[in-house]
Image: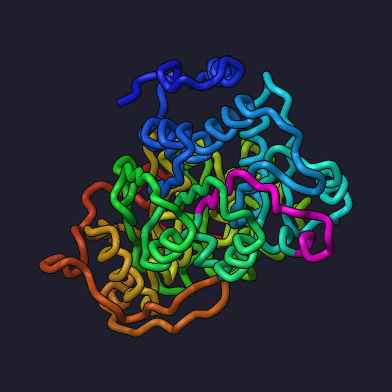
């Protein structure tokens, strides 16, 4: 197993940039993937979020560009990275820029929600690396502003999320425009059958690097669930986040309008919060992320579509205001914490209609989630509910209500002796229920 970046035989300008970034030891996905990619192999990489996947594909791409210098084709790109969200696309582009600081690199990022003028200008003479969200990319291809017939390397990042969001047809339309002779990389946090099928259709004799079992959760994340009625969720969320141990938190909701309401409620009660979702303008999303990173915003309230773009190392807590109706999304959500070797907390609020979704999640992650009952909003009805939740559409969600159950012998999960930071008794400034506006 490779123990240092120096052993990976990357070009000197890349090694210098890595040293300046403070990179010394590759993560398992990097150590496993980079040697295959330097050989030009196709690759299927399976690893959870926060494990260093961006560097795993960016570094060998840059190495290829350095060792094979040529001008990018007009309106084209030598390497294309497809990402599911604007925020993730922008962060990948930033990573390429950082790793390539000692080499000449023409790069561009393309996504919707902003005017296309600058994006069209950036592509006019071609770029070495293009990072794009599928929708805007197809739009510009259709207008004749982009030609990918000369592409050398294709990367599908967060492929499972792109499929969940309904991008599979867009991906196949894009792939149909690419040369057959290319290197293709597919990275995913989970491995449902849809990803197996996509990988089989796109990859040629791929190397497979899997550093954690599909759908497993990061060991450093301490998970808990609180059973509450839906009308008490805002107050319970305030109780959780109003705690000095909660340094920086992400709260996940199912619906965009709910994210707005939760954020407004927290702000009204003294917790600096911003909502981030698909209906927000790109400027608003960037301002929210900037405030979250610099610490002026304590809580980011997000929908699943925005989840993959929240790449901040020091998120101490993830709170699920709503459980996701797709178990794999739970894995993606809680992966926002415990990044870069840190520990983290993930606490979920479960109402009666979402009880079956919790059973699906426990089945997927292979263990029960610890139950916390010592709080003023505990609901026995929610904990013991057998309601079948509604089937939700939109956002790639697949209704899964009523399927499966918790592991045998674990009806409701262990009774939590250790309370999550932010739960009553877990270090709050106030005990019991708080009066809220």
Residue 400, placed above or below residue 2: below
Range drawn in magenta: 139-158
Q: Which image quarter: residue 282?
A: bottom right
Q: Main secondary structure of the magenta part?
A: loop
Q: Quadrant of residue 73?
A: top right
Question: Could you say which is closer to the camera, residue 161 or residue 284?
Answer: 161
Measuring from the top left, give residue 402's x and y in whole percent.
Answer: 31, 81
Instruction: Give the percent coordinates (x, y) of residue 140.
Output: 79, 60
Whether residue 422 is visible to the viewer of this picture, yes or no, is: no
Q: Residue at x 33, y 45 (%)?
A: 210
Quadrant the C terminus occupies:
bottom right
Say which residue appears at 38% left-offset and 48% top-offset.
46
Residue 151 horizontal/vertical position (percent): 66, 47
Q: Quadrant of the N terminus?
A: top left
> Hey, which quadrant is residue 279 in on the image?
bottom right
In percent of the image, x 63 and y 31: which residue is there?
65
- Number of numbered markers: 0
Horizontal and vertical percent position of residue 337: 44, 43
Give the farthest residue toward the front. 181
Q: Which of these two is toward me, 226 or 377?
A: 226
**Residue in the foreground of this view, choosing between 13 and 20:** 13
Tell me: 152 left or right of 26: right
Asked if residue 175 lies left or right of residue 146, the reply is: left
Q: Is residue 292 visible?
A: yes
Name the outermost residue toward the left.
409
Q: What residue is at 55 percent from the left and 39 percent from the top?
A: 312
Residue 349 counted in the magenta span: no
Q: Is residue 144 within the magenta segment?
A: yes
Horizontal side of 227 relative to 151 (left or right) equals: left
**Is residue 359 placed above or below 79 in the rendered structure?**
below
């Amino acid at each position: 197993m490779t123990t240092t970046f120096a052993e990976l035989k990357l070009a000197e300008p890349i090694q210098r940039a890595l040293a300046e970034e403070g990179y010394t030891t590759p993560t398992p996905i990097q150590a496993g993937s980079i040697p295959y990619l330097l050989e030009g192999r196709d690759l299927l990489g399976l690893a959870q979020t926060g494990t260093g996947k961006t560097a795993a594909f960016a570094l060998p791409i840059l190495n290829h560009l350095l060792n094979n210098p040529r001008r990018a084709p007009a309106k084209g790109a030598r390497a294309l990275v497809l990402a599911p969200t604007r925020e993730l696309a922008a962060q990948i582009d930033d990573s390429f820029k950082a790793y390539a600081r000692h080499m000449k690199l023409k790069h561009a990022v393309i996504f919707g929600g902003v005017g296309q003028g600058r994006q069209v200008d950036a592509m006019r003479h071609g770029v070495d690396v293009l990072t794009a969200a599928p929708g805007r990319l197809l739009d510009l291809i259709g207008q004749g502003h982009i030609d990918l017939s000369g592409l050398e390397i294709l990367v599908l990042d967060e492929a499972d999320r792109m499929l969940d969001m309904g991008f599979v047809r867009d991906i196949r339309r894009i792939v149909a425009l690419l040369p057959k002779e290319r290197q293709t990389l597919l990275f995913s946090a989970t491995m449902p059958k849809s990803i197996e099928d996509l990988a089989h259709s796109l990859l040629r004799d791929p190397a497979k690097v899997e550093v954690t079992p599909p759908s497993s959760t990061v060991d450093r994340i301490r998970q808990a669930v609180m059973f509450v009625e839906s009308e008490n969720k805002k107050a319970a969320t305030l109780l959780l986040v109003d705690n000095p141990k909660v340094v920086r938190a992400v709260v996940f909701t199912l619906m965009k309008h709910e994210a707005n309401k939760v954020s407004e409620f927290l702000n009204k009660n003294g917790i600096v919060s911003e909502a981030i979702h698909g209906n927000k303008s790109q400027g608003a999303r960037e301002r929210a992320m900037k405030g979250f990173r610099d610490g002026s915003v304590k809580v980011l309230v997000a929908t699943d579509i925005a989840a993959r773009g929240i790449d901040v190392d020091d998120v101490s807590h993830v709170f699920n205001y709503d459980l996701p109706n797709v178990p794999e999304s739970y894995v993606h959500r809680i992966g926002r914490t415990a990044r870069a070797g840190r520990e983290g907390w993930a606490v979920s609020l479960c109402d009666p209609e979402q009880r079956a979704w919790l059973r699906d999640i426990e089945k997927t992650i292979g263990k029960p989630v610890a139950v916390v009952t010592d709080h003023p909003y505990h609901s026995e009805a929610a904990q013991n509910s057998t309601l079948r939740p509604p089937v939700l559409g939109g956002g790639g969600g697949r209704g899964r209500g009523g399927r499966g159950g918790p592991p045998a012998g674990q009806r409701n999960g262990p009774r939590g002796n250790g309370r999550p930071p932010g739960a009553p008794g877990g270090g709050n400034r106030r005990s019991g229920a708080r009066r809220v506006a």
